[in-house]
Amino acid sequence: MSRDTKRTQVDDAGGQSKPEAQGTTQTPPAHRPSLFRRIGRRVDAIPLSTKLVTCIIVLLTIGTIGISFSIRTLVGNYLLQKTDTQLINQAQLVFNNMDSLGDTTDSENSRNSLMNTYYVEVRTSDSKITGTGLVPVLKDGVVSEPSLPADGSSDGVTLGQPFTTQAVVHVTGNHTPDHSTMQAAQSPWRVVALPWSERGKDGQVKSSGIVYIGLSLSDQIDTANTLTRYCAMVGIAVVLLGAILGTIVVQSTLTPLKRIEKTAAKIAAGDLSQRVPDMPENTEVGSLSVSLNSMLTRIEESFHAQEETTEKMKQFVSDASHELRTPLAAIHGYAELYKMQRDMPGALERADESIEHIEASSSRMTVLVEDLLSLARLDEGRGIDITQQVPLTSVVRDAADDLHALDPDRGISCGRVTLNPGTDLEHPSDFAFQDGDMPAITLTGDASRLRQVVTNIVGNIHRYTPADSPVEISMGVLPASISPESLSRMPANEQSMHHLVEAIEVGQSMQVGMNYAIVRFSDHGPGVPPEARSKIFERFYTADPSRARQKGGTGLGMAIAQSVVKAHHGFICASGSDGGGLTLTVVLPVAPVEPQPVPLVETRKADKKSRKTKKQG
């Protein structure tokens, strides 16, 4: 690099630094989007269908060009190899007819002979031209000759090895040749140099010189050009057809995606019931639609569950406010009444009555607050210990004794829970009461909380049924092919009860699953309407619209019972009783089912029976 160049570069650098010194703001190179990022953004903005169709067209174009080029190359090499083979194989014929080829008396016949497509030139051993054996003449007197090495020079030509050379064209006729003739005449030549020997007068064969034999490549080039044109035409047709079919296939394939887009827009507008159209699951779009529909179903269920939870929370707050306001209003009213009457005669007796009412209202409010606190603790997973060994039979028997003490005239029957098989679809399998002693059942749980569940159920029977109506209390252990987690998640309705019965039938037939303790309390009172049975486990639910509490309940007993049962991974449900009334079924997990081995005697009997059957067959 010269000093002037260096100086020029320094001046240029200084000239570039002056605007920066003057305060001109320039975007640093690091913050400028690179060329690849700009191209990537442009590409990302192109629709997917356009990208796919473009890729198909590009791939088809590259493929057709590659195939056409390969075919032309293979055919060209094949034709050139055949020309070389023809030149070498025809050399002996040229040697045998050198005398007739050198005879110029019948040159016209020589040119019109079968070998008039060959060019033959004879040279001495030192590459001196002695004459031209044969020169082909084309239409309109056009003569095409190969460009050979100059007289007296071999120019590096190897004997017996064909080579390609350009054509030298002469026009000897008076007519102007057409384009096709001139194009054929200007085609290259394929020439091979072979040694030429002749026999002397003494009979000895000696080397006389070199013979150049050539064939024009016009036919081969014309064949290759024709093949190329056909390949180009077929390639263009394939590209066009592929573009049309690709567009149709891409558009038809992406149509479900557009439907998904429209469905998503409707869902975004608030219609959660919309679903993506079903497609075959073995396709990508079909698998996507199935996944989206599953997701949308769960979202809709979660949304409705959230709405229900919100409504229940609003109702709970309203009910709790109502329940707490009633005793507070009573306390406040009786307190004011006492103040108003304390200076009047007989105030002491009336004060005792007011104090009794205030005490009753405060006791009711205390029970209500304690129940609310118990529910809150159960919702948080506190206030319960499910690691104790609970004699469930003793708990249920004590509850039956308490009910008998409360209602001496009530008929109470204790027994076992059995499963009656169904006869048809209209009469499915169901639980039944079997009179007798209750089985001894012990499970892991919280004894005080389970006793609270049973006490709440018995208290409802005492409170809401006639004192002389009979009650059946039954217990039993049955296997069911359902996990405790799935059981606790089932809603408290009769459909879940049917599902449980089906699981028990499978568990009994296959001896798999979990053993469950089933406790049933069946009364024959006024009962609860079928549409309201699942609501009795809601907090502050009552069938009385006035929400009066003449029976002394808080409306939280069954809600507490359900929370305790779910904390034990169990299930509680209300259903109708045979003959009228209400049946409450409590299901609690005991232990996994242990497979029972088949006795050896029964196995032998079964083998003998099968052998007899085979012999009879």
Image (cartoon, rainbow, N blue to C red):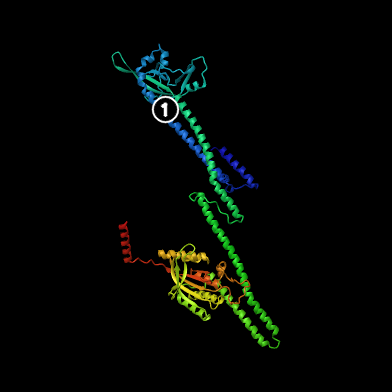
The residue pinned by badge 1 equals: 80
Residue for point 51% across, 18% down:
177
Residue for point 56% across, 59% down:
300
Farthest-out residue, front: 616
User: Where in the figure is residue 592, as x and y percent of width and height?
Assistant: 42, 67
Camera-nearest residue between 182 and 519: 519
Q: Is residue 457 above or below residue 66?
A: below
Residue for point 52% across, 20% down:
178
* SS category of the residue bearing label 1: helix
Q: Amino acid at mark 1?
A: Leu
When asked about the image quadrant of residue 476, the answer is bottom left
User: Where in the figure is residue 36, as x and y percent of width and height?
Assistant: 55, 45
User: Where in the figure is residue 30, as x and y percent of width and height?
Assistant: 57, 48
User: Where in the figure is residue 381, as x and y percent of width and height?
Assistant: 52, 70
Camera-nearest residue between 453 and 129: 453
Farthest-out residue, bottom: 345
Q: Is residue 272 above or below residue 27?
A: below
Determine if residue 490 is in view. no
Camera-nearest residue between 361 and 163: 361
Q: Which quadrant is the C terminus positioned in? A: bottom left
Q: Is residue 506 above or below residue 556?
A: above
Determine if residue 220 is in view. yes
Total labels: the figure holds 1
Residue 612 in the figure: left or right of residue 444: left
